[in-house]
Image (spheres, helix red, strand yellow):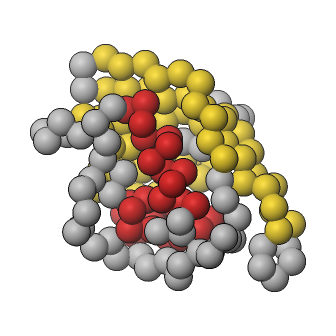
Amino acid sequence: MTVHEPHLRPEHTAPEGVEDPAELPEAFARAFNAGDLTAVDRLFEPGAVRVLRPGEVVVGDDRRAATASFLALGIPIRLSPRHTYVHDDLALIIGDYRIVGTTPDGKAVHHEGSATDVARRGPDGRWRYAIDNPPGVDRA
């Protein structure tokens, strides 16, 4: 897999979000596995937060930088969605993820867990992540 050099400032030239919140994990995996930080970022609301570990969240450029660090590993993500619960313009997405492999410089990587993410339907009718919570219900 070729991973493109991630950049931290998204260029908004492609459509954002998805039409069904259940499509977000697949869209995320496609963009992540292509090494495309801009495409990944378009799946998030501008003010979206990412939980790095229980009690530690990042937003904005720090959220993009955290994503870029995972993209830089050059290891594909595997997502297995379990449930999507929708109420009005909010959705709770629960699924399992796995990033396991070896970086180009030979470092072994093993990240996996069950994420609990929140998506919101925007005024344009498209869904985007509002809260990206890979640790799910892990305890600190």
- Above or below, 140 against 5 in this view is above
Q: Residue furthest front?
A: 1
Residue sitting at x 42%, y 36% = 23
Please provide percent x and percent y for residue 64: 45, 66
Q: Is residue 92 left or right of residue 140?
A: left
Quarter of the rendering containing residue 14 = bottom left
Residue sitting at x 72%, y 47% = 98
Please provide percent x and percent y for residue 113: 71, 39
Quarter of the rendering containing residue 90 = top left
- Name the quadrant of the N terminus: bottom right
The reply to whether residue 61 is visible in this rendering is yes
Please provide percent x and percent y for residue 46: 28, 56
Q: Is residue 98 left or right of residue 120?
A: right
Residue sitting at x 46%, y 23% = 84
Residue sitting at x 25%, y 26% = 89
- Name the quadrant of the C terminus: top right
- Above or below, 51 against 136 in this view is below
Q: Is residue 140 left or right of residue 118?
A: right
